[in-house]
């Protein structure tokens, strides 16, 4: 799979079937689009290509009010690799790109991306101020396929719906909409050893997310190992401003520093709270471990 972080020169790339979007979450609707793209690629013998934007347009326009990230850029690319997409365009969404006219964008798709077939969702819009839509694509002389919205329980599957489910701790609903358990990946880094000092060593995960839509204490799986995770601001121990993910791995004492790992969230145990003392926190952690072990035995 080739990853491009710029718009190529005209005629430098081979013809492709292309889909365009933010793909935050890569939920069931996104997966339907990707599957249709792969079918089109196979049937037309065109390379498969996906164009995504970084940062998310709403992070650019309204950074303070932008939605939390369900999936990081790295997690998106990992998923696209698993589906054997031929090439990914990670387009920098900045002032210049946001001011691009719809006509210019179509020209780039045709001449520089070499899109011969385009697949998009029903609500797709593009160009400065989202001036262009599906009808403009249909007039562009590029074969355009409109993939119908995906529904679950008679409701449209959306990233917003998944953020709400994760925020409320409803991992069952989130899984139903994602088609898989919710997962965060990251690199195990050195922390301040506070967990070890109080008797519960943790793997500290450097996340690539911009404010993940989930927090609290969870039963998790770290790659092939089970554990208890706290995703929060550690209010009892000093407190921090940015969410931090820490995983206490059950019955495990080896060194994971420097490894890139995947944390799968299986069940929410409780919200994060501030305890009156470290001793009270230790008592609760023991209860959290018992709750996790009880749940995990049922899997």
Image: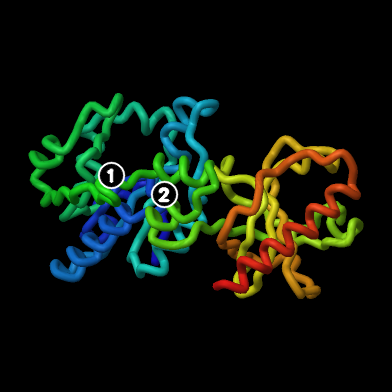
Give the residue at mark 1. Answer: 155
Q: Residue 154: x and y, percent?
A: 25, 47
Q: Residue 206: x and y, percent?
A: 68, 53
Question: Residue drawn at (16%, 55%), measured in percent from left and top?
Answer: 116
Q: Residue 8: x and y, percent?
A: 34, 50
77 in relation to 112, above or below: below
Question: Residue drawn at (59%, 50%), measured in percent from left and top?
Answer: 208
Give the class, few, some or many, for how many residues have Cα within 10 Å of label 1's Cα (few <14, many ≥20): few
Q: Secondary structure at mark 2?
A: strand
Quarter holding the N terminus is: bottom left
Question: Residue drawn at (68%, 57%), measured in percent from left and top?
Answer: 229
For marks 1 and 2, the one nearer the N-term is 2
Tag in front: 1 or 2: 1
Task: Decide if residue 144 is in sight here.
Answer: yes
Say which quarter of the image contains residue 261: bottom right
Q: Secondary structure at mark 1?
A: strand
Q: Residue 40: x and y, percent?
A: 17, 63
Give the class, few, some or many, for how many residues have Cα within 10 Å of label 2's Cα (few <14, many ≥20): many
273 vs 137, left or right, is right
167 vs 10, left or right, is right
Give the residue at mark 2. Answer: 90
Say which quarter of the image contains residue 99: top left
223 in relation to 196, above or below: below
Quarter holding the C terminus is: bottom right
Question: Residue drawn at (63%, 51%), measured in percent from left and top?
Answer: 207
53 in relation to 57, above or below: below
């Amino acid at each position: 799979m080739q990853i491009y972080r710029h718009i190529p020169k005209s005629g430098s790339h081979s013809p492709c079937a292309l889909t365009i979007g933010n793909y935050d979450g890569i939920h069931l609707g996104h997966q339907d689009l990707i599957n249709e793209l792969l079918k089109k690629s196979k049937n037309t013998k065109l390379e498969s290509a996906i164009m995504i934007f970084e940062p998310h347009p709403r992070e650019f326009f309204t950074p303070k009010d932008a939605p939390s990230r369900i999936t990081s850029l790295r997690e998106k690319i990992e998923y696209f690799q698993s589906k054997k997409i031929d090439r990914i365009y990670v387009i920098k969404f900045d002032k210049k790109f946001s001011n691009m006219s719809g006509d210019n964008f179509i020209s780039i798709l045709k001449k520089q991306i070499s899109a011969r077939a385009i697949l998009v969702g029903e609500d797709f819009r593009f160009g400065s101020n989202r001036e262009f839509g599906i009808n403009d694509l249909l007039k562009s002389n590029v074969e355009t396929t409109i993939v119908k919205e995906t529904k679950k329980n008679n409701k449209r599957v959306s990233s917003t719906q998944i953020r709400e489910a994760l925020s409320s701790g409803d991992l069952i609903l989130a899984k139903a909409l994602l088609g898989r358990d919710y997962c965060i990946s990251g690199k195990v880094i050195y922390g301040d050893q506070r967990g070890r000092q109080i008797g519960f060593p943790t793997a500290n995960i450097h996340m690539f997310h911009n404010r993940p839509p989930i927090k609290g204490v969870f039963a998790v799986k770290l790659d092939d190992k089970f554990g208890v995770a706290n995703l929060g601001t550690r209010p009892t121990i000093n407190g921090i401003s940015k969410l931090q993910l820490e995983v206490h791995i059950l019955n495990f004492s080896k060194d994971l520093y420097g490894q890139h790992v995947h944390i799968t969230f299986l069940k929410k145990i409780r919200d994060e709270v501030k305890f009156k003392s470290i001793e009270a926190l230790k008592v609760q952690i023991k209860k959290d471990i018992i709750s996790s072990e009880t749940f995990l035995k049922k899997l």
